[in-house]
Amino acid sequence: MTQALPPVSTRDEWEERVSKMRLPEAAYVAGHPVEAVSGETFANFSPTTGNIVNHVAAADAADVDRAVAAARAAFVQGDWANSSPGDRKKVLLRLAGLIRENAEELALLESLDMGKPISDALNVDVPAAAGVWQWHAEAIDKIYDEIAPTGRGDLALVRREPLGVVAAVVPWNFPLDMAAWKCAPALAAGNSVVLKPAEQSPLSALRLAELATEAGVPDGVLNVLPGFGETAGQALGRHPDVDCLAFTGSTEVGKYFLSYSAESNAKPVWLELGGKSPNLVFADAESLDEVAAKTAFGIFYNQGEVCSANSRLLVHRSVKDELLERLVEQAAAMAPGHPLDPDTTMGALVSREHTDRVMEFVESGRKTARLVVGGERLTLSSDCYVTPTIFDDVSNDQEIARDEIFGPVLSVISFDDEAEAVRIANDTRFGLAASVWTSDLSRALRVSEQLKVGTVSVNTVDALSPMTPFGGFKQSGVGRDLSLHSFDKYTALKTTWICY
Ligand code: NAD
């Protein structure tokens, strides 16, 4: 049983907790922690401490075979797959409760692994993950099947069935939340799951597996394989006994999964990929203070490591200078700090390699645009900190406007009229999200209709809830996470036609 520890409130207390904490390091298969079949481990670097925090089982193809076999055996045995939706609901609600009871531990694992501020991990990520488990658990016994309108003498039942073994491969930016977005609907629908967290952030997924067992998820129904993409990830993508592959990550790797599927068993592949989301500010926006505050949040929150980050600010020329002035103030207020300091609002980037990459974009921006603020790499607990950065006078064909930087870097582009704003917004290979700021309802609706993105937030940024589907147009992906639509990905419709 897990035991609640006393609440923690200062950086010293969090650091003391780290020093006493058990960090998960084994893979989790068939309800138990196991070493990798090869016995190999990999070093788990923390940008929060600047050190290797532990060594974690390095799963590869042999581990994938073992975990998929365990998932299949559990599915065929049927304790989970054949249980009533109401029974699965009870177990998954218990899991949501255990996530909340263990919030501090999970938040700490999250912050250690990927450098996010502990306050965000504790107040946003962990409650959000619990909320996603709860929402899908509560939904599953409220979805009815169908009877087709055949007429007398025929009865055609249209029922949803779980697919079998679902593999989920997820990124490091919101490890616990991304795991919940995939696993909660897949498990609620009765599937077995093999989850592969990113190699940068294995800890919270491994703890989640233990909590799932404690909640009553049968052995083999949720398996977790820490390991690298080219080995464990690819083996899942190519496995002939995986019925469905749900991926969140970069567009580049998402495309690999399409080919893995084509070259193996043609499993359905659902992709939540990258973005370069535009934030359109019209001159009639109600409050530039509000726009500045939300714009800063939209690009700097989570160190800018957000798929739907509003990384292109498209602003009407007449209000640009005024808005920029306010944005610079916001950026200054978000200076990076130690992730375990509860007052920190911007933490460390996930790794040295990723920080190097972000700084290459900053260098590219210095050559092509005008640096307004930031652009510095800092060494605090590690050298993975980048100050909030704003480039002005960017044109949409520059690298910093076209590529996903996945760091705290904002590109500001001016426009003169609505048609130009929409054209620039859509001139990207991505289509995940967009924001529109205006006090004119007709304009809000007109522009929203024209934007080729999965979510348009009007007079806010990043509107998001388990109730609404999330995903992308174009190269931002295929399929939708969250909402009742997420069950479509993890179930197949079966028609049973009876003549009488
Ligand atoms: P990534 O694509 O490098 O890795 C994601 C996952 O894929 C990891 O588990 C990784 O181990 C695995 N992987 C890497 N190479 C692989 C390969 N060759 N074969 C199989 N698996 C492989 O992405 P990342 O750096 O972890 O995360 C950042 C990306 O995720 C960004 O592009 C971001 O936009 C995207 N993202 C999208 C959403 C969304 O909902 N659309 C949400 C969060 C993050």
Image (tube, helix red, strand yellow):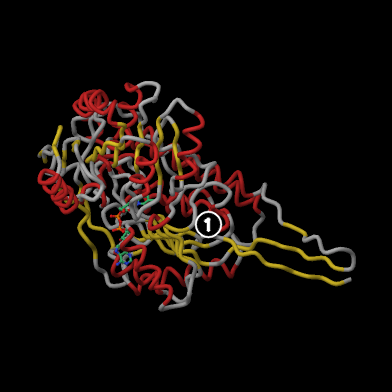
Q: Could you tell me residue 259's position as x and y percent?
A: 38, 73
- Quadrant housing residue 12: top left
Quarter of the picture holding the N terminus: top left
The relative height of residue 288 versus residue 159 in the rendered view (above or below) is above
Q: Could you tell me residue 267's position as x and y percent?
A: 48, 71
Q: Does residue 423 appear left or right of residue 345 in this picture?
A: right
Q: Could you tell me residue 422's position as x and y percent?
A: 39, 43
Q: Could you tell me residue 139's position as x and y percent?
A: 61, 46
**Which residue in the protein does label 1 denote?**
186
Residue at 41%, 55% in the rendered image:
272
Residue 13 or 253: which is nearer the viewer? 253
Q: How many marks?
A: 1
Residue at 71%, 56% in the rendered image:
145
Residue at 36%, 46% in the rendered image:
423
Quarter of the picture holding the C terminus: bottom right
Q: Does residue 147 appear left or right of residue 331 in this picture?
A: right
Secondary structure type for disc 1: helix
Residue 293 or 59: which is nearer the viewer? 293
The relative height of residue 7 versus residue 116 in the rendered view (above or below) is above
Residue 258 or 351: which is nearer the viewer? 258
Q: Ligand 1 appears in which quadrant?
A: bottom left
